[in-house]
């Protein structure tokens, strides 16, 4: 495809192409009223997820459907392939370097969202987790696996994917799809792209000697390219080549341009910010987070009727084998990883128990954290209880039954769990960082602490105990938290506006 014609040619403005009008390859994207967007992600909660990315990827494209012709591209993991129905093969995507060729198939979710799936059994159909094996070690070929995803997106955008549908813009997410704009640039294609950073610490780093196997031109191993501190970084390349960068809260957008949170990429990101090419957009949450209608709960409730909240607390104590108690019930619902500051939460458990509190924990992750939490449960039977693993029903019941959610994250790009907790009247006790700072109003919808330390967390825990022992305050805070809005309309409107400005500038 040749260079796209400039959007600011006045003769070309205002003419609108209706969706499906046949204008596909090479059509000027700015002319479409309903632009074609390919949303590329390594997690999609309909089929498979590790954390919040999977949930955002399932919700955001759906919320954007009224404004865009949006489709999703995901890898064909075993869990995906086994759940697909009505699959049509659309093309065979060629190899590059040692990245194998693969089939591209098209499917639809039950509610009609089109999902493209890359079938490449040797890379994706295996036992273990999405990014690592059963022992927790990253898959050795993660470079090939996620270069395959980025390359597929680039090939679809260049017209080798679905001949009947060529996107006007790629929306990429995290390092796992971030090579797409780089492959396009190396092939001389300029197709607008938006890259959303959900977590800057995952930079997709691989040794330089992998350049050839990834089909990366040696000239691109440069500060103005894919090079990062002597390694290849998929995320760095994405940030460098994408037209626009977004991240999932305004505070995190400000944090990542600083040396403290910038993971070495703050200089590049600061440049993007100064050019108006870095935007923070806070995630929404699904409307199913409604305590009046959620079928998973022991009893429904609302801020006009607290009986149901109490019934959920009782049921939760029973499920987790906790003693009957009138004290506060804390919950941790989290991936058990360093990011979440759970080492600090573990140190605070003794104080919570001494003050008459109880704690329920669920999640999985780093074995050291799993071990320490299990040890706490052994040490305080009837007071502390943990379920290693993750199950949606249990997670919802925990947020409905608990009084407080502990979230002392070291950093938190957005965070969904604190928003879920608020809707269920469980007040987050959280570090003032990233999306936590943007979604929790201290003393109103939760309790924030500034200094990330045991002392900082304990200060907020003592404040939460004061709230708990003042029933009118507790009720007022729960009410304010539960009144927080749900839904994805605001986020979708912001992304649609970024798509439009990116297409217009292309
Ligand atoms: P993150 O994506 O960093 O884990 P978020 O708060 O954005 O944090 O999203 C967490 C989402 O993942 C929530 O929906 C939560 O219920 C879910 N979740 C938490 N722990 C696990 C886990 N161990 N496995 C799968 N999903 C989890
Ligand atoms: C990442 C972040 C989390 C965010 C989620 C969805 O997993 O850690 O804060 O909510 O992505 O954007």
Image: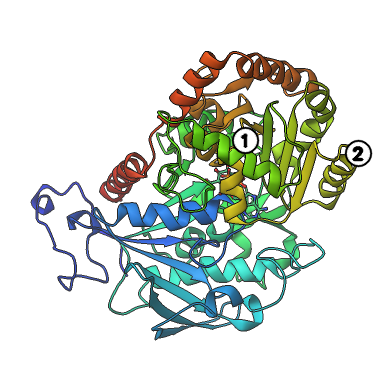
Distance CA(mark 1)–CA(mark 2): 21 Å
Residue 379 position within the rendered picture, expressed as x and y whole percent measured from the top left:
91, 38
Tell me if label 1 and label 2 are in contact, CB under 8 Å. Answer: no
What's the mark number on residue 402? 1
| Mark 1 lies within 8 Å of ligand 1 (Cβ measured) | no
Examine the image and state in which quarter residue 25 appears. bottom left
Q: Is residue 228 above or below residue 423?
A: below
Q: Secondary structure at mark 1?
A: loop
Dot 1 or dot 2, earlier in sequence: 2
What's the mark number on residue 52? none
What's the mark number on residue 379? 2
Q: Residue at x 59, y 29 (%)?
A: 428
Residue 64 position within the rendered picture, expressed as x and y whole percent measured from the top left:
31, 53
Q: Is residue 10 left or right of residue 97?
A: left
Q: Is residue 473 visible?
A: yes
Name the one closer to the observer, 296 or 337: 296
For the N terminus, the quadrant is bottom left
Q: Badge 2: few (under 14), some or many (20 or more) residues near its Cα, within 10 Å?
A: few
Q: Is residue 133 above or below residue 103?
A: above
Examine the image and state in which quarter residue 331 appears. top right
Residue 65 position within the rendered picture, expressed as x and y whole percent measured from the top left:
28, 57
Q: Is residue 408 left or right of residue 288?
A: right
Q: Secondary structure at mark 2?
A: helix
Q: Is residue 354 above or below residue 20?
A: above
Colour basis = rainbow
Residue 185 position within the rendered picture, expressed as x and y whole percent measured from the top left:
46, 60
């Amino acid at each position: 495809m040749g260079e796209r014609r400039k959007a600011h040619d006045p003769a070309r403005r205002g003419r609108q192409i209706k969706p499906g009008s046949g204008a596909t390859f090479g059509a000027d994207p700015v002319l479409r009223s309903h632009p074609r967007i390919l949303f590329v992600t390594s997690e999609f909660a309909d089929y498979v997820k590790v954390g919040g990315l999977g949930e955002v990827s399932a919700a955001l494209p759906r919320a954007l459907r009224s404004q865009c012709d949006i489709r999703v591209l995901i890898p064909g993991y075993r869990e995906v392939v086994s759940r697909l129905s009505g699959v049509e093969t659309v093309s065979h995507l060629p190899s590059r370097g040692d990245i194998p060729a693969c089939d591209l198939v098209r499917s639809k979710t039950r509610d009609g969202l089109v999902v493209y799936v890359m079938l490449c059994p040797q890379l994706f159909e295996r036992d273990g987790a999405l990014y690592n094996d059963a022992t927790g070690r990253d898959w050795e070929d993660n470079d090939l696996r996620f270069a395959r995803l980025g390359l597929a997106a680039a090939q679809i955008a260049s017209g080798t994917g679905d001949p009947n549908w060529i996107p006007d813009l790629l929306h990429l997410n995290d390092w796992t799809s971030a090579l797409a704009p780089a492959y396009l640039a190396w092939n001389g294609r300029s197709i607008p792209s938006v890259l959303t950073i959900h977590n800057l610490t995952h930079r997709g780093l691989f040794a330089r000697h992998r350049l050839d196997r990834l089909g990366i031109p040696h000239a691109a191993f440069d500060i103005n390219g894919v090079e990062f501190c002597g390694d290849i970084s998929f995320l760095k390349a994405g940030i460098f080549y994408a037209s626009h960068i977004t991240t999932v809260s305004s505070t995190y957008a400000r944090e990542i341009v600083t040396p403290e949170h910038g993971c070495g990429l703050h200089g590049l990101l600061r440049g993007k910010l100064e050019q108006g090419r870095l935007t923070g957009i806070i995630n929404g949450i699904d409307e199913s987070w409604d305590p009046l209608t959620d079928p998973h709960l022991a009893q429904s409730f609302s801020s006009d009727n607290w009986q149901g909240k109490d019934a959920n607390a009782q049921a939760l104590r029973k499920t987790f084998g906790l003693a009957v108690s009138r004290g506060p019930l804390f919950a941790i619902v989290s991936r058990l990883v360093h990011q979440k500051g759970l080492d600090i939460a573990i140190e605070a458990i003794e104080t919570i128990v001494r003050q008459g509190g109880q704690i329920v924990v669920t999640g999985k992750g780093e074995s050291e954290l799993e071990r320490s939490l299990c040890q706490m449960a052994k040490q305080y039977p009837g007071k502390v209880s943990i379920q290693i693993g993750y199950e949606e029903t249990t997670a919802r019941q925990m947020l409905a039954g608990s009084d407080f959610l502990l979230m002392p994250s070291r950093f938190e790009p957005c965070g969904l769990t604190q928003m879920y907790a608020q809707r269920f009247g469980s007040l987050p006790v959280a570090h003032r960082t990233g999306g936590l700072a943007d979604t929790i109003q201290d003393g109103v919808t939760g309790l924030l602490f500034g200094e990330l330390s045991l002392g900082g967390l304990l200060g907020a825990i003592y404040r939460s105990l004061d709230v708990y022992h003042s029933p009118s305050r507790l009720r007022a805070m729960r009410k304010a938290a539960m009144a927080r809005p749900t839904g994805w309309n605001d986020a979708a409107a912001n992304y649609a506006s970024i798509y439009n400005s990116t297409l217009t500038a292309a």
